[in-house]
Amino acid sequence: MEIKGFDYERVTVADGVTLQAAVGGSGSPVVLLHGFPQTHLMWRHVAADLAADHTVICPDLRGYGASDKPVDTDGERYAKRTMAADVVALARALGHERFALAGHDRGALVAVRAGLDHPDAVTHLAALDVLPTLDMWDVLHGTTAAVGFHLYLMAQPPGLPEQLISGSSDAFFGHFLDVWTRDPAALPADVRAAYLAASRAAVPSIVADYRASAGIDVVHDRADLSAGNRLRMPVTVLQQDWGAALGYDAAALWRAWAPDLEHRTVSCGHFMAEEAPAEVVAALRALLAR
């Protein structure tokens, strides 16, 4: 499936790695990064709206969708630092040295790393329904951590997670599409089937992405925290009220990373770009005006 009215390009972003991206509209550039277990298609409503006055770029992340899925031989090929460099290279190849960046879920973690590593390239940053990696691990305690069981499963050494998930991939990925959605109509059958097919074909790389967040991503984030590296650009965060459920102050956690922060809670489910696209568009347009 494709985003109606958008052109599709394949762009080499690193040695042996090509990303597929949907590109539409004209004006100042905005890059939109998808989450798990999805592809760029999750942005179809938001992208169409923003394309009225922006150049909108929606890639499939490394390891997802129609983008390349290199084998993770060194534990770093799916580091958010590596994936963020992909995004900057993609934008540059399309003629944009500076761009606004929004990410959902896994894509938000890539966006944050891009903001930390490439502050001269990222003008504005939005993160949808995640916490920074270090904070994510810190807030999971006791039985409440069961909500993040997939984080622990995919953090295990190579072999068992891939085997277990591949053995029942539609049930595994479909579980998240179902339980994280408050409005099932937001994920119609054809879209849901596209997400399942894409995820089914990408189990090793999806696991590698998550495994990196229990390894090399933690190393990189701790180094930034110690060095005082923060997000210098205006930042907007949209989140479900997980803080109330798990007992933490989400805005305070984010403010430690992003001094120029607008933090909002939403009433929709996790897949907010599909469940509440008008709310997401309004937040992004407000961010771009800052």
Image: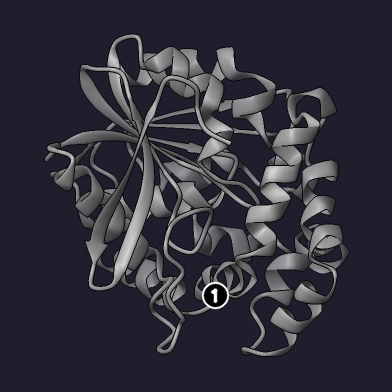
Q: Would you say 68 lies left or right of 64 here?
A: left
Q: Position of residue 11 (x, y in %)?
A: 26, 52
Judged left or right of residue 108, residue 270 is: right
Left or right, residue 275 beside residue 230: right
Q: Is residue 151 above or below residue 46?
A: below
264 vs 17, nearest the viewer: 17
**What percent of the width, then of the height, locates residue 279?**
57, 15
Task: Tell me if residue 265 can be seen.
Answer: no
Camera sees residue 163: yes
Q: Residue at x 42, y 75 (%)?
A: 70
Using the image, determine if residue 37 lies above or below residue 244: below
Where is 31 relative to 283, above or below? below
Residue 33, picture quadrant? top left
Q: Quadrant of the C terminus?
A: top left
Relative placement, left or right, of 213 versus 125 is: right
The local crowd at label 1, few if under 14, some if 14 to 19, many if 20 or more residues have their Cα within 10 Å, is: many
Q: What residue is rendered at 20% in x and 21% in y?
A: 28
Which residue is label 1 attached to? 208
Instruction: Please state which amino acid type lies under the numbered disc 1.
Output: Ala
> Where is the N terminus found, in terms of image quarters?
top right
Residue at image point 43% right, 71% down? 78
Q: Quadrant of residue 168?
A: bottom right
Q: Secondary structure under badge 1?
A: helix
Q: Is residue 182 above or below residue 222?
A: above
Query: Residue 214, position in %: x, y?
Result: 55, 75
Q: Residue at x 75, y 61 (%)?
A: 148
Nearest the viewer among 196 and 78 is 196
